[in-house]
Amino acid sequence: MEKSETTIDDDSGGKNNEQNLEPETSCEINYWEIGGKRYAGDVKEKEKAKQQFEEAKSRGESAGHIAASYTIRYAPSLDDQKAMSEQGISGQFTVKYDVTRDKDAGDVLIVNGFFVHLFAPKDIEPLPKDVMFVLDRSGSMSGRKIEQLKNAMAVILKDMKPEDRLNILFFDDKFDWLADNTMLEGTVVNFDKARRFVKAITARGGTDINQAVIDGIKLLTSFLNTKTSSIVMFLTDGVPTSGETDIDLILRNVRTTNEAKLPIFSLGFGNNVNLNFLKRMSTQNNGFARKIYEDSDAALQIEGLYSEISSALLKNVTFEYLGDIDYGTITKFYFPFYFGGSELIVAGRLKSKNSKIEPRVRGWNNGYIDLIWRPRPVPDLVALTTDADFSTITENMWAYLTIKQLIRELEGDITSIEKNRIKAKIIDLALQYQFVTPFTSMVVTAPNLRRPTPQLRRPELQGQSDLAAWHCLCADQEAQEAQEAQEAQEAQ
């Protein structure tokens, strides 16, 4: 496999290859391949991008209206491929990497008046966790879905530790609790009880999301402990059909009930789920939402999300900086949790290019921990990129993080005036720094080429943490599809 290429778009104008976009996604790109050649692209507001694309298509020019692409090149020799098996290389292509970590305040990179602070300490013991599982077992979960959920919960329960506590609420239009009015200790007896409880559940009834989430929050809040990480894990495959069904009222009720700001991590299961609703709920309550695709590895997807949120190393993480910083430009610098295997990133602008800063990071793990910054030599990043790219590397990262943060703010409880202001700011930054977002697209045209056959590879994306499923619009593909349809009709 010489190259694995994924093309991503959040536009909904595609045909059979339409996918859902994770709204926090934004990417920086500046070219597209047509006929084996690269052509420069231009990021525009969506409607303007569509118009340019349609005009190019009407002229018979090769054109692409895309959102983003990234390329991973893997070129094993023939001997390398034969060494894998007699048939060569076969299987899922996975890329993983990590960086050197220490138990300190992380690394700071400063270039041309912008800084990026990367924080991922090691050697910190995970906090014990209290997990309130709020799980949909309504009629639409029948069959394969409920079995996949049971399989995932079996693995999750096996991974929980003796110092953890849990309760499980299965809901439809009625509720079944693992235990009434308590969080069960992580004993062998209680884990066995939980496994039997999950195994016996059957799908039935409607979907009362409002009361289920509220009741889960109330129970977990009554057992809050500063020494533990308390989280709500909420899974549903549909929309509210019982009890309160108005989305805005449900969101308001959940916010009002969640005075303790417990993080709610939502999993939307299958194609009928209102993912935007779940994202708003989680964003407004210190969590995030993911879509679980209903296929053979759905149980693995559920287990994967749980593994992300089940290892809290620090709570209430705050970043402070000594130095000449423009605090009006700094990105988010308070985080409710730092989870093992993740990374917290803060970026901002200095008041002058020659300014220096010293970060201070504090978080809670059975008492507050102050993590000290230890300056380290900067690696030779210029060797990995061009001089021009290196000169803007921190500025572009700042712009990316700012846009991502603004997109999350759109899902919060804000007025329409504030939403319009944030949207305008996103578009301004996206156009300035050439980022594709839910409100901007990139258009590429190659006027001198007609009817090329670009090689587009579209591997399936399985809801990974910062990946979205995108699609491209290609004039030549549409023309080819139209011709094939006409030939099939004539043949009949």
Image (cartoon, rainbow, N blue to C red):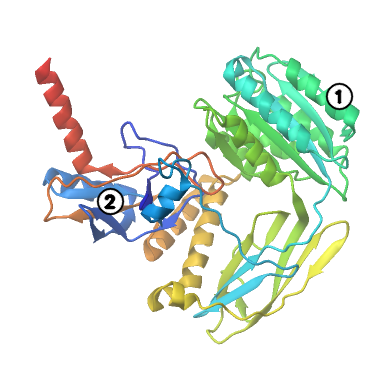
Quadrant hosting residue 244: top right
Viewed as shown, does residue 75 lie left or right of 142?
left
Q: Nearer the viewer, residue 283 or 303?
A: 303
Q: Is residue 327 left or right of residue 420?
A: right
Q: Of the two numbered discs 1 and 2 on the same chain, state the one appearing first in sequence.
A: 2
- Measuring 65% from the left and 30% from the top, which residue is drawn there? 235
Query: Which residue type carries mark 1?
Result: Ala
Picture coordinates of residue 333, whole percent (x, y): 66, 63
Residue 132 seen in this snapshot:
no
Q: Which residue is mark 1?
A: 179
C-alpha span from label 1 to label 2: 56 Å
Q: Quadrant of residue 191?
A: top right
From what the image shows, is residue 185 above or below residue 367? above
- What residue sits 65% from the left and 12% below the top? 205
Measuring from the top left, give residue 469's x and y in whole percent.
44, 41
Q: Inspect this view and state whether residue 54 appears.
A: yes
Q: Which mark is residue 48?
A: 2
Q: Position of residue 420 (x, y in %)?
A: 47, 50
Secondary element under disc 2, as helix, strand or loop, is helix
Contact, CB < 8 Å: mark 1 with mark 2? no
Please state the total of marks drawn on the protein image: 2
- Residue 374's disc is none
Residue placed most toward the observer, 443 or 408: 443
Other-residue count near label 2 (Cα within 10 Å), few / some / many at <14 / 14–19 / ≥20: some
Quarter of the image where the C terminus is located? top left
- Amino acid type of disc 2? Lys
Q: Nearer the viewer, mark 1 or mark 2?
A: 1
Q: Secondary structure at mark 1?
A: loop
**Which residue is found at the position 75% from the left and 51% from the top?**
312
Q: Residues within 10 Å of mark 1 (few under 14, many from 20)?
A: some
**Which residue is found at the position 33% from the left and 57% from the top?**
43
